[in-house]
Image (tube, rainbow, N blue to C red):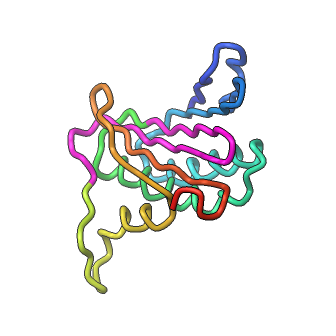
Amino acid sequence: MEPQSMTKSDAASPIAVRDDLQEACWDLPAHPQAVGEARELAREALRVWSLPGLVEEVTVIVSELVTNAIVHGRPPITFALHRRGPLVRGEVTDHGAGRPASISAGADEVHGRGLAIVSAYCSRWGVEPAPGGKTVWFICADEPGRLR
């Protein structure tokens, strides 16, 4: 997994700081182990940014979105985090043609709850077109009640 620097000033570090915006971006392999790797990358970025209160929310959301990109999308897969003040925006980009859609999952269903989980853990989320695919994004706030 090759980290990508979001700024030209520090190409060695995937976690960059520019003014009041902090960013990190990584290319992920399209295999199930990438889900755990993405969680660890998120934990490390939030630790560097002194946002331990967002670790649980962000890692749960990242798990769901990276899993969806692996199962339903197409490589390459990119995972990015952007922090401005108490807000963190996460993005998972893949090159699949489909758009994620919430489905109703029955009590005995194994699949179908991912986007409901994402919605429960973040302030907002959505989907944007990206060159050759889509980006699923989410926002979490380190201030209770800020965006919810």
Question: Where residue 135 sits: x, y (%)?
Answer: 37, 39
Q: Which residues are magenta?
A: 78-100
Where residue 116 appears, x then y in whole percent? 37, 67
Nearer to the camera, 147 or 98: 147
Q: Within the image, what quadrant is residue 19 found in? A: top right
Where is residue 36? Give x, y as percent. 56, 54
Is residue 79 part of the magenta span, yes or no? Answer: yes
Q: Which of 113/137 is in front?
A: 137
For the point 51% across and 64% down, the residue is 121
Q: Main secondary structure of the magenta part?
A: strand
Depicted 13 relative to depicted 72: above or below: above
Image position of 128 (left or right of 33) = left
When the figure is inspected, residue 109 is found, relative to residue 95, above or below; the finding is below
Residue nearer the viewer, 13 or 85? 85
Q: Where is residue 124, by image quadrant?
A: bottom left
- From this viewpoint, which residue is outermost toward the bottom? 107
Q: Please give left or right for residue 123 compared with residue 9 in the image.
A: left
10 left or right, relative to 59: right
On the rendered image, what quadrant is the N terminus found in?
Answer: top right
Q: Residue at x 33, y 44 (%)?
A: 127
**Residue closest to the far left:** 97
Q: Is residue 46 magenta?
A: no
